Image (spheres, rainbow, N blue to C red):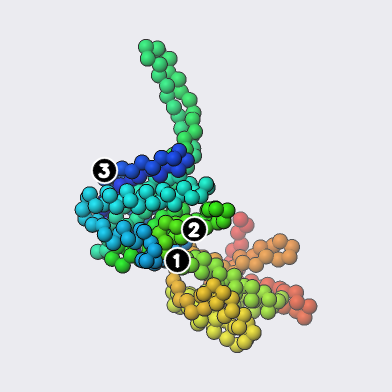
Amino acid sequence: MIAKDDIVIRKAILHILDTNRGECILSNTLLDPGPDLHDFIRNHIYKIVSSDDTKNCEFDPEYSPIYSILETWDESDETSFIETSQAIANKLYVAMGEGLDIPAADLLFVTFQAEGIIYLALLKMNYKESYTHEITEIPDNPVINTDIIKTHSLLPSATSRIPEAVVINLSDYHIKLLEKKYEINGEKAYYLSENFLVCRTSIPPKKKLNILTRVINNISNKYDGADLKTKMDTKSALQKEYVDNKSFDIEEIGNKLFGKSPEKKSEFDEKMEQYDLQYDNFTVTNESTVKKLEKQVMVTDSGIEISIPMETYNKLANFEVQTDVTGKSTIIIRNIDNLVLK
């Protein structure tokens, strides 16, 4: 993964794609960012490349107009850089105009270098509405009027993560993409990947993990019923698989969790195949993505919620689940030195 300190900004230019006002204003000069703006751009790029919400994509070279443009540009030449940025900004403006609810934005077109590789970042800085002050002075009059007005063109803050962005590795044209669906011609569509970039996308790691855990939970609930211990052991085995391998090998996980039950294994394979994940092996970038695996969370029929760290659960001497013949469960937690009410 690219470290934030390794990101070196090479060139940047800003274009205004204000579809609300019907204005596509293309700059013909590069930005001259100082240290603060460098940090602003670097922070946004890092949030994109380190996110488990990004999709890994590949251009469709035969049909992608963006791929054709990038093949002929010279990133090191200032004139070529500006003209290329204008051509791509204009195509994005046209794509944005196809959907009424696609947000107007400024396009920050940036090249940066990390670990010896040059990348192109298209940062779509969607406008935000907020309030600011306005000062009105009347000539030859001592009266100064101050007012509060709503502005519609504020850019995202440095601490937020923008929801739409593209990062392209210029050595192999591999794409990292953050995108959202918007309504186009009456149907929700990913306009960035389908209409603008024209690329083939994959499911982002965070969504893959959500699919995997949901399928496992559904199978456990379906076949294990009131057997709380078996369901919790299944989640513990999934967490152990990640701790041991730092990745999620779908086929291996299916064998370890459900290999002894042909019925469960068959359903697991079928569900994974529906998402074309049956042979996938994926990793996550942020530890926060797998936080949900670090706890066993139970909610009783009376609304009581119990959250147990997986480390505590795995120490069987401190934790026990007993299920009687009627299916009722009793949870026993031992060796508690201190109890704090939150």
Residue at the left extreme? 77
> Could you say whether the residue bearing mark 2 is in a helix, strand or loop?
loop
Which sits in the foreground, 271 or 132?
271
Q: What is the crowding at mark 1: few (fewer than 14 residues within 10 Å), some, or many (at least 20)?
A: some
- Location of residue 163 in the rendering, given as x and y in whole percent from the top left corner: 46, 53
Say which residue appears at 45% left-offset and 66% top-offset.
201
- Location of residue 341 in the rendering, given as x and y in whole percent from the top left corner: 62, 57
**300 versus 135 height, above or below:** below
Residue 308: assigned label: none
Residue 29: assigned label: 3
Say which residue appears at 36% left-offset and 49% top-offset.
89
Residue 201: assigned label: 1
- Separation of disc 1 and disc 3 at Cα? 33 Å
Q: Are marks 1 and 2 in contact (CB under 8 Å)?
A: yes
**341 versus 291 height, above or below:** above
- Total marks placed: 3
- Separation of disc 1 and disc 2 at Cα? 10 Å
Which sits in the foreground, 35 or 135?
135
Residue under label 2: 190
> Could you say whether the residue bearing mark 3 is in a helix, strand or loop?
loop
Tell me which numbered mark, 1 or 2, is placed earlier along the sequence: 2
Query: What's the residue type where badge 3 is placed?
Result: Thr
Query: What's the residue type where badge 2 is placed?
Result: Tyr
Say which residue appears at 63% left-offset and 82% top-offset.
264
Tell me which numbered mark, 2 or 3, is placed earlier along the sequence: 3
